[in-house]
Image (cartoon, rainbow, N blue to C red):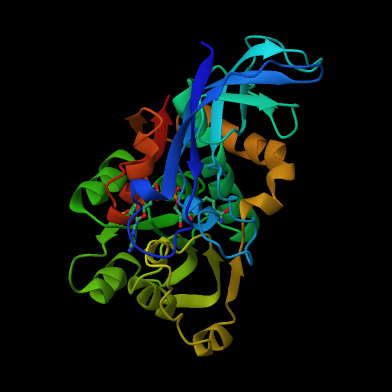
Amino acid sequence: MTTYTAINLIKYHERGPISPDYFQTVKLDKPNANAGELIVKQTYMSLDPAMFGWMNADTDSYMPPVELGTVMRSFGIGEVVESNHSGFNVGDRITGMMGWQEYFLSNGEGLEKVDSSLPDVDILSVLSLPGLTATQGLFNVGKAKSGETLVVTGAAGSVGSIVGQLAKADGLRVIGIVGSEEKANWIVKELGFDGAINYKSDELDAQLAALAPNGIDLFFENTGGPIQHLIYNRMNEHGRIVLCGLIAGYEKGEYSAAPSWMNAIRKRLTIQGFVMTDHFHNSQALLEKLAPYVLEGKIKHRSHVLTGLESAISGLNLFSTGGNKGKLIVKL
Ligand SMILES: NC(=O)c1ccc[n+]([C@@H]2O[C@H](COP(=O)([O-])OP(=O)(O)OC[C@H]3O[C@@H](n4cnc5c(N)ncnc54)[C@H](OP(=O)(O)O)[C@@H]3O)[C@@H](O)[C@H]2O)c1
């Protein structure tokens, strides 16, 4: 192959669904690896809700936006096909921020060798961002304790489903909030959650009261939306709220008002946001915590795999419609 395909971001997103006019598909000449360089053939790339932020012109975030006219940012997995780098050999399996492109020329910076025999899809679904985020958020931020009650939103998603299963394995009572009956059934019947609430159904507060009769100690927030206020109002004294994501606002580009701080004073709550870019240096320790649960078969997952680089464009809209069933991944 002398050329390969890449997709550049050419317009910033403000609000509304993602359409093809935000991107330009380009054919590039395949590079050679010079001294100190390697080339990775990407096999699968991860789609993540964070991409809405990376596609936005706002520079006041934890990561700068993707520069217009350059390849769209993404995390992926692949195999080294050419190497002039002493640290990497042809055939090594690699993860890293490789972008929406078939081949990735690198000096090795930021790339990690995969130290697992699990298939590529499982690595991206569990042992990469979703599992690291769930582990960091639940244990290090949320300080989950056996016997407590956890409510997690986005509970059938890639992060939320792992949060709930880790918490179940550690003896918490786990209630998941989801957007469909199919997802509610999956997290209760397949993943072993104690209960599920479809936030599109009625009588949400009564459902919460029934499923969390002793109140809520830990709230892992992935979505935002009206149920946030109801969960917040049922927090127990010294409860913790882990702010991981607010996906209900990403496509619209606006976020609903948060609940009153009064309850945080009365109940002495700890409310903490976190982003994984602050914690990637600690990935090894997080994986050491997560891996035993995976090896013991306590973490099931679903992967939603799209095919072809350009499927990434419309694929991003699945996050907002709830159309993704599990970790959203593109097979190249
Ligand atoms: N802080 C960090 O470092 C970090 C790292 C990774 C991810 N995150 C955040 O974690 C969250 C989950 O990410 P993920 O990759 O695991 O995605 P995901 O949960 O697999 O997919 C997104 C899900 O969000 C739900 N959703 C969409 N619009 C919604 C709305 N208006 N109200 C309620 N739910 C809605 C949909 O599920 P339903 O069908 O159930 O509605 C959709 O399937 C996101 O907010 C993401 O930004 C944060």
Above or below, 47 relative to 160: above
Ligand 1's quadrant: bottom left
Above or below, 221 relative to 277: below
- The residue positioned 39% from the left and 38% from the top of the image is 312
Occupied quadrant, residue 132: top right
- The residue positioned 39% from the left and 65% from the top of the image is 15
Residue 24 rendering spot, x and y as whole percentages: 44, 40
156 vs 303, nearest the viewer: 303
Query: Quick check: 11 left or right of 96?
Result: left
Residue 88 rendering spot, x and y as whole percentages: 74, 16
In which quadrant will I find the C terminus?
Answer: top left
Above or below, 248 relative to 275: below
Residue 3 rendering spot, x and y as whole percentages: 52, 18
4 vs 255, nearest the viewer: 4
Query: Quick check: 297 left or right of 88?
Result: left
130 vs 297, nearest the viewer: 130
Above or below, 115 relative to 237: above
28 vs 55, nearest the viewer: 28
